Image: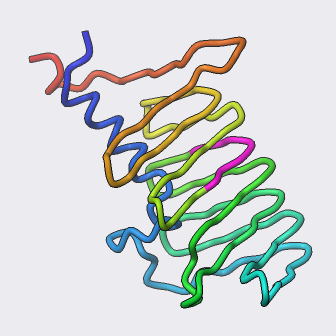
Amino acid sequence: MICISRYKALIFLILIFFPILLGAKKNTPSSPVKVQADEMRYFGTERKSTFHGNVVAVSDNYTLTADDVTVFLDKTNEISKIKCVGNVNFRSEDIISISKRADLDQKKKIAVITGNVKVWQGENYLEGEKVFIYYEEERIVVDKGTDKRVTIIFKPTDEGKK
């Protein structure tokens, strides 16, 4: 039987999955974000930057890698959307995730992580084909895909044994 507090812990695990990219202030890096790629292009009229080939974004509290990353800006030059494609890996102090794609919408506060999604926090684990994270609603939906089922593994704690 899964304790309700463990379920809430998983929700918070996923809610902090991409907070820096969605503008959560408590996880905003205090140092500059360094982005490296094989190629970078900026399209002023479209308000977007594309990074191609071995993209690595590093901050003081996370590292994001992907084959390609596209960053869309709004009229005030704030990030509105980020699309990461191919071998998407996110690592922070206590979270590791891998997927094939991640689409992040700053305005709607929604993240859609797709393609054999795997997320670890310590010994806790989540796996699915597509993960929808609705930040403002504190809601998560995990789709299984066609060939498998959603998998969640919780490591019991002393608190959960009471």
The residue located at (72%, 83%) in the rendering is: 47
Q: Going by the picture, which residue comes out furthest to the top?
A: 1
Across the whole image, how many numbered discs are drawn on residues? 0
Residue drawn at x 85%, y 63% as measured from the top left: 54
Magenta segment includes 76: no
Q: In which quarter of the image is residue 48?
A: bottom right
Q: In this view, does 77 lie to the left or right of 43?
A: left
The residue positioned 55% from the left and 36% from the top of the image is 131
Residue furthest out toward the left = 162
- Up/down of 102 relative to 1, above or below: below
Range covered by the magenta-colored residues: 97-103
Q: Nearer the viewer, residue 18 or 73?
A: 73
Magenta span: predominant SS is strand
Q: In this view, does 88 lie above or below 99?
A: below
Depth order, front residue of 113/57: 113
Name the side, left or right, on which 107 lies relative to 52.
left
Picture coordinates of residue 5, whole percent (x, y):
19, 30
Which residue shows up at 65% across the image and 12% down it? 148
41 sits to left or right of 62? right
Expressed as whole percent of the image width and height from the top left, the position of residue 102 reads: 65, 50
- Quadrant (top left/top right/bottom left/bottom right) for the C terminus: top left
Q: Nearer the viewer, residue 93 or 101?
A: 101
Name the quadrant of the N terminus: top left
Q: Position of residue 40 (x, y in %)?
A: 86, 79
Figure quadrant of residue 118: top right
Q: Is 83 on the left or on the right of 97, as rendered? A: right
